[in-house]
Amino acid sequence: MNKQIFGKTFFAIIQLIGLLLLAACAAPPEAPQSLKAPEILAFPAPPEEPRFIFERSLYDSTDVVAEDADFKLRQLFTGESAKGGKGMAKPYAVAVFQGRVFVSDSAQRFVSVFDLPNQRFYTIGDDGPGQLTKPLGLDVDRAGNLYVADATAKVVVVFDKDGKFLRRIGGAKWFTRLASVTVDPKGDRMYVVDVGGVTSQDHRIRVFNPVSGEHLFDFGTRGAGPGELNFPYDLAVGKEGRLYVVDSGNFRISVFTRDGKYLDSFGTAGKQAGSFARPKEIAADADGNVYVIDAAFGNFQIFNPEGELLLVIGQSSERDEPAKYMLPSGIFVDEDGRVYVVDQWFRKVDVFRPAHLKPEQGYFAARNKPDAVKK
């Protein structure tokens, strides 16, 4: 080989090696957005100590049903999308039992079930003797039985956790505008909220035996005074059996004993945190803290049992993002302290995990076997 050619080649190789060494020392290129670890969305935001972490959203059956091997192979070679599963048209309320997320859909006239531990999806009340006409409020008892407030039929329809019809309670003579149902943790009472009407004084809570359907007593009448209600929408059972009622027309939460004796109220009309504009549903956790959805604010507010504000999560938005809402309506706190929020406009359920709970803990992450539940 010609010495001159050899020298040029050798010099080029040395330059290439030098460039490679420099590249190795340089900072690596930024990872594509799809490969980046997702940011943790905590509430309250840093530097405060987090109390809740946004965990995930549920939109349709593909968010819970496991993909089979054939689908994964097709997706690899064809880019087929997982979207197109059975979704929600107008979700309203949510209830959860050991990882089974029940969501009422007033437009599709059934309850969607996202069975997270067993990775399956099914519907309840779309046919048969328990067929629903306008399901709104939901609750579950200690056995996992599902109670559905059917606003059009003016009855509470009861199913077991797998969707088998059990019984109906109530009827047209009992309710003016049936809105929600709540079962006492003791299992001996079922509180049903009757919103009432513009010309009606029957803005009240009707109490039944959840098994026999026997009517036990009522409390509440229309008004703005202590113990009176104006368009009540929902009820939650809190600490020591206290009943927290969303008194929407009075922009407050009214508190009663489990026997319907008035105790106190908190909240007022306003725009600041701790006030209400359009309160819809309410839930309570194991510590007795109370969670109130407000459709106008696009958030939920958390209060202690005495009505003192602890935290606000969420905000109004025209864009669907985690903890962003256009028309929130339903809320539920499960056995593990996870919070589930329904938004009618974005047709989703957002899930928030208590900061002390690890992702793999609780019923939410269990897989098929009861002994897989980690506490």
Image (tube, rainbow, N blue to C red):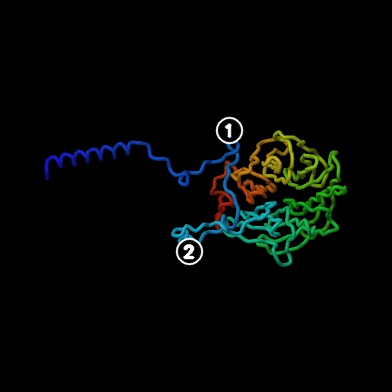
Q: Nearer the viewer, residue 283 or 318?
A: 318
Q: Secondary structure at mark 2?
A: helix
Q: Position of residue 368 (x, y in %)?
A: 56, 59
Q: Nearer the viewer, residue 158 or 179?
A: 179
The answer to whether residue 16 is above or below residue 158 is: above
Q: Is residue 289 above or below residue 107?
A: above
Residue 342: in sight, yes or no?
no
Q: Are marks 1 and 2 in contact (CB under 8 Å)?
A: no
Q: Amino acid at mark 1?
A: Glu
Residue at x 62%, y 43% (from the top left corner): 324
Give the position of the N terminus as an image quadrant.
Answer: top left
Which of label 1 and label 2 is nearer to you? 2
Q: Name above or below for residue 196 compared with residue 124.
A: above
Within 10 angstroms of label 2, few (less than 14), some, or many (20 or more) residues?
A: few
Q: Say whether disc 1 or disc 2 marks the residue closer to the N-terminus.
A: 1
Given residues 37 and 315, the one toward you in this image is 315
Q: Position of residue 70 (x, y in %)?
A: 48, 63
Residue 70 — which label? 2
* Residue extending furthest toward the bottom: 128
Q: Residues within 10 Å of mark 1 (few under 14, many from 20)?
A: few
* Residue 227 marker: none
Q: Position of residue 179 (x, y in %)?
A: 77, 52
Q: Amino acid at mark 2?
A: Asp
- Residue at point 64% right, 48% down? 340
Element under disc 1: loop
Q: Is residue 123 visible?
A: yes
Q: Residue furthest left?
A: 2
**Residue 308 occupies quadrant:** top right
Residue that carries the numbered disc 1 in the rendered image: 48
Write down the quadrant of residue 210 in the picture: bottom right
Measured Cα–Cα span from mark 1 to mark 2: 46 Å
